[in-house]
Image (cartoon, grey):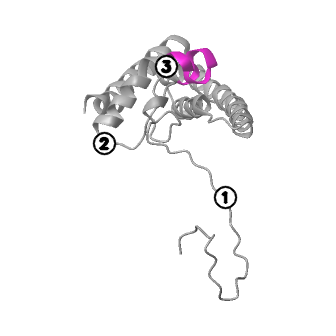
Amino acid sequence: MPILFIIFVVIPVIEITLLIKVGQAIGGWYTVGLVLLSAFIGVNMLRYQGVTTLLKARSRIESGEIPLSEMRDGILIAIGGALLVTPGFVTDVIGFSCLLPFTRGLFFNLFGQRISEAFTKGGGQAHFYSSTQHSQDPYSPNRSDIIDGDFVEVNDPPNNGQNNSDDKRLN
């Protein structure tokens, strides 16, 4: 509940207050121009970072790897894009920092563990695996209940109703 209060009440109040203060300092039309300019720059950065992340994910998939870091980056890029088209300076700063590659890692280090804990406590189906958690994966090749075996394909020759005593196959 406190996070929803912050998102829907506190941040808009801060944004409105900041827009009024900036508008009084530099003028209303300049403030509107700054908001539109930041949205324009943000959309272009969003497009560039999104395409770059998509190409990285595609190359990892083609090499047979799971693009976990690219999926994480994609989520943060989408959040950053949504924040950049929201009018305001605080959301623009957070949105731009979600689009910059070096700050995306910082955001995930700060909030990734909390998000993962929230999903596991709440019974959510999302799991954020790090390199140390792969041993907990139910499909991990290091599990002890995997049975290795060999097989031989046997083609039945026509036996014309005769039972061969050398045949050790189960009937």
Q: Residues within 10 Å of mark 3 (few under 14, many from 20)?
A: few
Q: Looking at the image, which residue is at 50% across and 45% down?
A: 147
Left or right position of 59 against 77: right
Residue marked by disc 2? 123
75 or 161, which is in the foreground? 161
Q: What is the quadrant of residue 156 in the picture?
A: bottom right
- Give the structural element (helix, strand or loop) at label 2: loop
Does residue 19 lie above or below 86 as drawn?
above
| Residue 18, image x, y percentages | 43, 18
148 or 90, which is in the foreground? 148
- The kind of residue tagged 1 is Val
Name which of mark 3 and mark 2 comes first in the sequence. Answer: 3
- The kind of residue tagged 2 is Gly
Q: What is the quadrant of residue 58 in the picture?
A: top right
Given this view, does label 2 or label 1 mark the residue nearer the observer? 1
Residue marked by disc 3? 107
Q: Residues within 10 Å of mark 2 (few under 14, many from 20)?
A: few
Q: Looking at the image, which residue is at 62% across and 34% down?
A: 67
**Mark 1 to mark 3 CA distance (whole Å):** 53 Å
Left or right position of 43 against 133: right
